[in-house]
Image: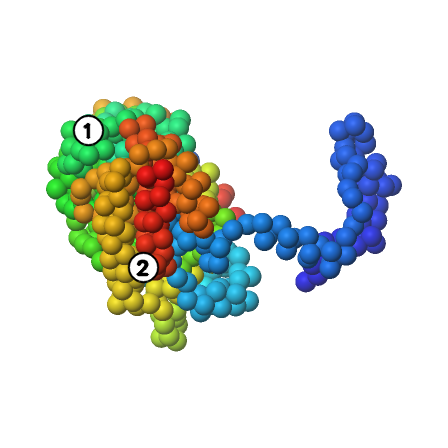
């Protein structure tokens, strides 16, 4: 197959076939002034000059590997990525693969997806996983679609905890507009210290889904078992948005009784990049599999009795459902999902737990040191994983500008999403932060606090 | 092709039994869909239906299809066991695999078995 889309001879042959003399004649119905404009471009550069210019632009960026110490998380986390992950992703067999439209011919791709699904089920404590979504936020929105379809539109209320990531809540609002759904609890002015059990009061016979986050947006860990029981008593499903690293250490949402567990796979060996691409995992229970978006790969045996993989289910996709399709995931994030599968396979159960424990211990060391600074303090007292809200005595922008001068990328400004948390910063600590890094943060914050 | 003479038929390949109000999909429909792996009934006992409204969704290894009410009326019963045994649609489409039973059904424009047999034959060739 040639990658040159059209040669002059082919073009002339096509023009002759349709009875047009030249390409311009083909576009004569488009008024000249609306045709493709003349581009006012500078003279072309040589390859050497282009490389020089682009390198200069790239160097203007600061990154978390060599330039800055990062304490920024809020959904995307700076973890160590073993170099094997990238080597696997760059293998031509995976790197160039597009959605296999005759999937069974691509056994390697199907096996990789199958492995990914199995790992996600093990991590979340759930029964089935699809082959992934774009990111955690879209996976959460798809949970709403599942629950809405499960009750055939007869239950029109979704209860969303205000401590679900603000951007996830925004995506859920976007996804559900026009569905005539009521989103309850999605209020940035809600009492953020309120126990998750208090969400129960919003759950009614009209509720199809309750969404909570684990750890929540402020890093806090709750056991949602009671809330889930209460929601089930009203007939509603429960979706837990989870951080996959935390799941190596804490009780799984599956063990709490969750019906759907979603989240962003970025912490599992995917770089921060420039905010994406990422991958969303989506796991649920067998009984809801026909309402799940995307695709599901299964293991089977071929006619010779050999292990093989098939595209088992694409119940909501267009090639099955035609005009009634409610999902169009296509190639989605196959390569990124593969990256998470490679990462998890490399680390194994113990390795991932070790990463989680390092994050936990370091975050707790940081929190203990930071809370000693006069004029600062921890915002919440509940148990937390690797992220916590720190109360400052001046605006977050000001503090972050000061930290940047010390080569530190400060925490997330919570005031932009929660008016009550003005002057509050969300600090994330991972295994990438050394004790020296944390001490440097404490010192820089002490300075700004006493200024 | 099994086309019982006591039943009435729709162009979308549902059968309707005027004597009992039961309905399902025809032998022709199940053979076209091939192995059926999933069925979901979309209506409940007590619902009032108009003819042509979707009452079930069926998935086979090849395709997915909506099943429509052949007549209007009140849903007197639904075959709750069918979801656990979708393959019954292949093995016994007129018996075990009935889908819903309608009460006080207002029959629409349905075909008798001879007309339906002709309709199937036209599509096969």
Q: Which residue is mark 1?
A: A202
Mark 1 or 2: in front is: 2
Give the residue drawn at x 83%, y 54%: A9
Residue A386, percent from left and from top: 28, 51
Colouring style = rainbow
Q: Is residue A177 above or below residue A54?
A: above
Q: Quick check: marks 1 and 2 in contact, CB under 8 Å?
A: no
Q: Residues within 10 Å of mark 1 (few under 14, many from 20)?
A: some
Quarter the C terminus of chain A occupies: top left
Q: Position of residue A429 (x, y in %)?
A: 32, 52
> Percent from the top left, x then y, of residue A406?
44, 49
Residue A318 horizontal side relative to residue A121, left or right: right
Classify mark 1: helix, strand or loop: helix
Q: Is residue A32 left or right of residue A255?
A: right
The local crowd at label 2, few if under 14, some if 14 to 19, many if 20 or more residues have their Cα within 10 Å, is: few
| Label at residue A435 | 2
Q: Chain of mark 2?
A: A
Q: Is residue A325 visible?
A: no
Identify which residue is drawn at 81% across, 32% down: A28
Residue at x-position 44% and y-position 69%: A84
Figure quadrant of residue B56: top left
């Amino acid at each position: 197959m040639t990658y040159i889309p059209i040669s002059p001879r082919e073009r002339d042959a096509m023009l002759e076939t349709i009875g047009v003399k030249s390409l311009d004649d083909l576009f004569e119905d488009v008024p000249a002034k609306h045709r493709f404009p003349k581009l006012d471009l500078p003279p072309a550069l040589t390859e050497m000059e282009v490389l020089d210019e682009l390198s200069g632009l790239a160097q203007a960026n600061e990154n978390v590997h060599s330039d800055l110490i990062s304490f920024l998380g809020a959904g995307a986390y700076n973890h160590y990525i073993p170099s094997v992950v990238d080597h696997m992703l760059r293998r031509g067999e995976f790197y160039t693969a597009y959605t296999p439209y005759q999937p069974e011919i691509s056994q390697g791709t199907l096996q990789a997806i199958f492995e990914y699904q199995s790992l996600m089920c093990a991590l979340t404590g759930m029964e089935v996983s699809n082959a992934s979504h774009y990111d955690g936020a879209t996976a959460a929105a798809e949970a709403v679609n599942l629950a809405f379809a499960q009750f055939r539109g007869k239950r029109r209320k979704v209860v969303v905890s205000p401590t679900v990531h603000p951007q996830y809540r925004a995506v859920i609002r976007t996804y559900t507009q026009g569905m005539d759904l009521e989103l309850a609890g999605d209020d940035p002015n809600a009492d953020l210290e309120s126990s998750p059990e208090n969400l129960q009061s919003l759950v009614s016979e009209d509720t199809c889904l309750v969404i909570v986050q684990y750890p929540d947006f402020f890093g806090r860990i709750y056991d949602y078992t009671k809330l889930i029981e209460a929601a089930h008593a009203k007939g509603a499903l429960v979706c837990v948005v989870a951080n996959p690293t935390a799941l190596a250490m804490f009780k799984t949402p599956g063990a709490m009784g969750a019906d759907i567990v979603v989240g962003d796979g970025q912490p599992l060996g995917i770089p921060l990049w420039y905010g994406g691409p990422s991958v969303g995992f989506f796991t649920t229970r067998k009984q809801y599999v026909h309402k799940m978006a995307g695709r599901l790969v299964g293991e089977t045996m071929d006619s010779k009795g050999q292990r093989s993989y098939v595209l088992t289910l694409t119940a909501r996709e267009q090639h099955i459902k035609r005009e009634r399709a409610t999902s169009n995931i296509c190639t989605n994030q196959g390569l990124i999902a593969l990256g998470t599968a490679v990462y998890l396979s490399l680390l194994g159960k113990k390795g991932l737990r070790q990463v989680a424990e390092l994050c936990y211990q370091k975050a707790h060391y940081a929190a203990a040191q930071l809370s000693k600074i006069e004029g600062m303090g921890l915002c919440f007292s509940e148990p937390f994983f690797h992220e916590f809200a720190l109360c400052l005595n001046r605006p977050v922008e000001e503090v972050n500008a000061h930290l940047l001068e010390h080569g530190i990328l400060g925490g997330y400004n919570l005031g932009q999403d929660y008016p009550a948390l003005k002057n509050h910063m969300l600090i994330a600590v991972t295994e990438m932060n050394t004790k020296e890094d944390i001490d440097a943060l404490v010192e820089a914050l002490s300075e700004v606090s006493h200024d | 092709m099994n086309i019982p003479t006591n039943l009435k038929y729709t162009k979308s390949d549902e059968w309707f039994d005027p004597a009992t109000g039961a309905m399902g999909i025809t032998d022709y429909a199940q053979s076209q869909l091939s192995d059926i792996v999933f069925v979901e009934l979309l209506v409940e006992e007590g619902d009032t239906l108009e003819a042509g409204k979707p009452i079930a969704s069926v998935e086979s290894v090849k395709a997915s299809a909506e099943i429509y009410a052949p007549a209007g009326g009140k849903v007197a019963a639904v075959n709750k066991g069918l979801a656990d045994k979708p393959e019954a649609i292949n093995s016994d489409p007129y018996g075990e695999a009935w889908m819903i039973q309608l009460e006080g059904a207002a029959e629409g424009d349905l075909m008798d078995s001879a007309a339906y047999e002709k309709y199937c034959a036209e599509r096969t060739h």
